[in-house]
Amino acid sequence: MHFVTLYFKLSLLSQTICVCWFSDINLSSIINILSLPTALEQDQAVANFSWNRQKIISSLLDYNIYSDYEAPEKGVKISVLLYIDKLTKLNETEQSVNFHGSFLFSWKDERLQWKPKDYGGVEAVDIYQIDAGRIWMPQIRLLNIQNFYQDIITPYSTSFTIRRDGRIFGITKIALKVYCNFYLSNYPYDFQFCTMRLYSPKRFTSQVDFENNPLIWEQYNGRVRKITKLETTGYALVFANATRKATSIYRPPNILSNSTDPKMTQSFIDYNFKFKRTENLYGLIFMWPMTCTIIFTHVAASFNSTLHSVIWLMASLCFQYLNSSRLLKIIPPQHDEIPFCLTFSRFMIVETVVLFFCRILLNIFEVKSKLSEKLQRKGQKSEIMTIEILQNMEGGDMIIEKTNDVVDYLQNNYHLPKRCFQIFLVFYTIIILYYLHTKHNR
């Protein structure tokens, strides 16, 4: 019998040595595997934990000694962490953005303390929906969001964990629509700002206060970190900040409006989010169409033939009207300031109308000059234009001088105003194109 036992021990030892020699499993791993608890021991441990957990809940949340309607006597300070999981499309029409993530709250209730040695070494327990309603929880809400009247911390939307020192952790999944204020004067290099406020209604700072330096985190490659950049369609969240503030319940001109007494103030957390536009189609949408419009309009205005110039200016005006209508559809309809691209587009429409009338006036002058030249050849003298120069003299007298020299010169060189106008358009085109592209590439 002893020989058989010795044989099995030697066989087990030889197999262990072979496994350790020819595999990645070391001796300590084998010892850990052999020392694992049995299924019976695991079931017993789970049963003991469940029994101790229920014992903790029953003893701490006893209705005779604990009331969920009464806040802790010393007040609570709440630590807040906002975890942003993802962003959906920033809605420019509604001026809002949707956040998906979680709020993690933490506060201390000294009435919920226990000694682990009295409850089988249990140091923390999870509280589910049935028992969560028996815990006192602060009333927390958000401003500047849709459904702002709803509480964030509720027994059915928040998962609670109580630690042995009375520290309570609550995590709430959120899907928020936060409203923003859009400013499009620098479109498409604009930054949009969205804000929301976390507060506890009808509670003074002495009763419910927020910890300083609240945090905002994001998920990046499966890891949690502070906010750096979250992208959504057309925008990227480039900055997020949370600041704890406190303000007096009294308003000016009351002498207590600047009070910092915790019994006269309410604390809150302001969240500020900064979004940057990431669309790279600005050149295709505005820059190149407007560049072509400028060149086309100025070339049309410089034609020698007035008829051709007027026709092409009218065509340019129609094209610009269609382009402005397209820009109006792209740009959000609700905005306080007109963006540069739309302002410049309207400026070009006005300029085209001015060029249209300039060409008509130049044509009238040219026709009159030709008629006057024909009349002069027949010996008929006609006064076409009189230039009156009024000059104030020291004596106060007015001297009126009439001359036809300039008129005669222009009549003989009626093409000169048109040539000057064409030269002006060349330099003006270069200047305005330089300004437009400098504004784009700033």
Image: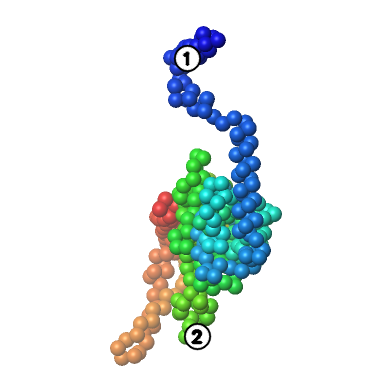
Residue density around tag 1, few if under 14, some if 14–19, many if 20 or more, within 10 Å: few
Element type where label 2 sits in the image: loop
Q: Name which residue type carries label 2.
A: Asn
Residue 131 can be seen, yes or no: yes
Residue with the mark numbered 2: 254
Residue at 56% over, 54% down: 162
Element type where label 1 sits in the image: helix
* Residue 243 placement (x, y as % from top left): 47, 63
Q: Name which residue type carries label 1.
A: Leu
Residue density around tag 2, few if under 14, some if 14–19, many if 20 or more, within 10 Å: few
* Residue 385 placement (x, y as % from top left): 46, 72
Residue with the mark numbered 1: 13
* Residue 234 placement (x, y as % from top left): 55, 49
Residue 171 can be seen, yes or no: no
Residue at 52% over, 11% down: 2
| Coloration mode | rainbow
Q: Residue furthest right?
A: 130
Q: How many marks?
A: 2
For this rendering, which residue is in front, 41 or 386? 41
